[in-house]
Amino acid sequence: MDAGTANDVSRRRLLDALLSGGILAFLGSVVYPVVRYLTPPKVHEVVATSVVAATVPELKPNSGKIFRFGSRPGILIRLPSGEFRAFSAVCTHLQCTVQYRSDMERIWCPCHNGQYDLAGKNVAGPPPSPLEAYDVMLKGQDVVVSRRA
Amino acid sequence: MSSPAAPSSRLLAWLDERLGIGEVITFLRHKTVPKGGHEVWYYFGGVSLFLFGIQVATGLLLLFYYKPGADSSYESVQFIVTRVPFGWLIRSLHSWSANLMVFAVFVHMFSVYFMKAYRPPRELTWMTGMVLLGLTMTFGFSGYLLPWNTLAFFATKVGTDISGLLPVVGPAVARLLRGGDEVSGATLTRFFGFHVAMLPAAFTAVLAVHLLLIQRQGMSEPLRAKTDSSKEGMPFFPGFILRDAILWLGVLALLLVLCTFLPWELGVKADPFSSAPAGIRPEWYFTFMSQTFKYLPAKIFGIDGDVVGICTFLIGGLILFFVSFLDRRAGRGERSPLFTLFGVLVILFMLTMVTLAYVKPY
């Protein structure tokens, strides 16, 4: 009798395990493809290495311009001295697009008041790191910006 | 043979035979709402419900013309507000009612909180309510992007980036929300799907449970009012429901005034390759968070300031969600000044940040 009861119990436990395991496997086989479906596939990103950001007459000293660098925005600045500098325009804080403030002579992010100096260094507000700097070359009247190797 | 009953009562009898609605009618006839000076707060749940109804109705109407997509969203909303007869009204109603709904939901939540109505046996009512609050804010966040204007574009960029700061799951969540690495047309399609299909389905289901629980358990009474059991309640039908109806009509009138005199702006079309404009801010009910992010330093004790910020908000939200279990004194019917203080501090913090966002943004 005792052996029979023990047998019943272990049989029940086996059935319970099979059933709950089956349910879990079923749920997994439903949820997994859905989660994978919702996760966007990696698309080949256009990696720009070099782009004509502006022409020299386009930018007066102490002004800035947003340009398209691959799939992300970049910012080209002409310093009051006339020198050109270029950085990624994506704020390192929460990825807003920054702008040049001629009154402050700084790069400024309006979303959370982050500030960078003209070397792209984060100097005030919440940004945790500097803006990525790009190389700027003049080819005739074209201002060519390229990613640093 | 008895005289034939009136058609309405025959219909009622026919329905009763099949559905047993007699029980519902008896229930409604005996249902009362407690009185005692605090009942003004009971109306905000109903107002939220009414505004949700407006959202559903106007949302369905907007679907007839709205076309999601980076090249069509802005243009279709522009078409709705400029060309479609009464399009301006439907669109403004949807936007204004959304804002009033968020406000009503917040008032409802805090009034329930301060009356400690979350105490047993109403834990589930409170928690489903908190889920509804979360869904309401998600509705607001996803709907904000749909006209595809500059403000919405950057608000979504920041908002999804903040979700990316969540420990462990953050980056995956941000990608899932955006439909890629950046906020783009793919994000718009997703947000549209969330806003018009997934969220309404989830909201309706949770709302049904929330309302059912309220009907099962009746209205909670504040602790101080409980001792006085001699007072009679107000009959739910017709006393309370008629007052509800008058208030709903008042809210509708207010909405129409707002839509007529302050129609909701469409703004400038989003351009992913332009700078974020000065004065950018999210919808007012998110400004308490966005304003806080302006003051957080880059590092706090070696941890990213934003991560500390988001984790603090998360913990605050969790305390509110589980307050039924945390506030044991209220559960025993005693006063719990600590939790009252917590609520007061939360409100003060939110009001300060919202005010700063509008008065002194930088």
Image (tube, coloured by chain):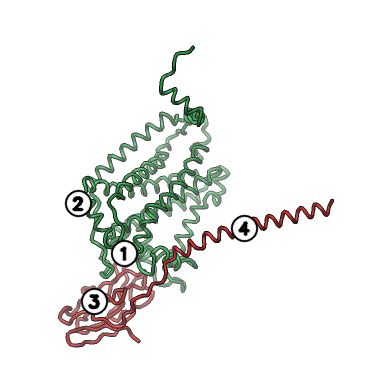
Residue that sits furthest to the left in the current view: A57
Could you tell whether B217 is left or right of B297 in the image?
right
Check the residue under mark 3 and report the chain it is in. A
State the residue position of label 3. Answer: A105
State the residue position of label 1. Answer: B154
| Labels 4 and 2 within one chain | no
Sequence-first tag of 3 and 4: 4
| Labels 3 and 4 within one chain | yes
Q: Which chain is green?
A: B
Q: Is residue B327 above or below residue B227?
A: below
Question: Would you identify the image quadrant in which residue A138 lies?
Answer: bottom left
Check the residue under mark 2 and report the chain it is in. B
Q: Residue at x 17, y 85 (%)?
A: A141
Q: CA distance from mark 3 to mark 4?
A: 65 Å
Q: Which chain is red?
A: A
Does residue B173 appear anywhere in the picture?
Answer: yes
Disc 3 residue type? Glu
| Residue toward you, B331 or A89 | A89
Can you give x and y, in whole percent of width and height, for residue A107 in the image? Answer: 27, 75
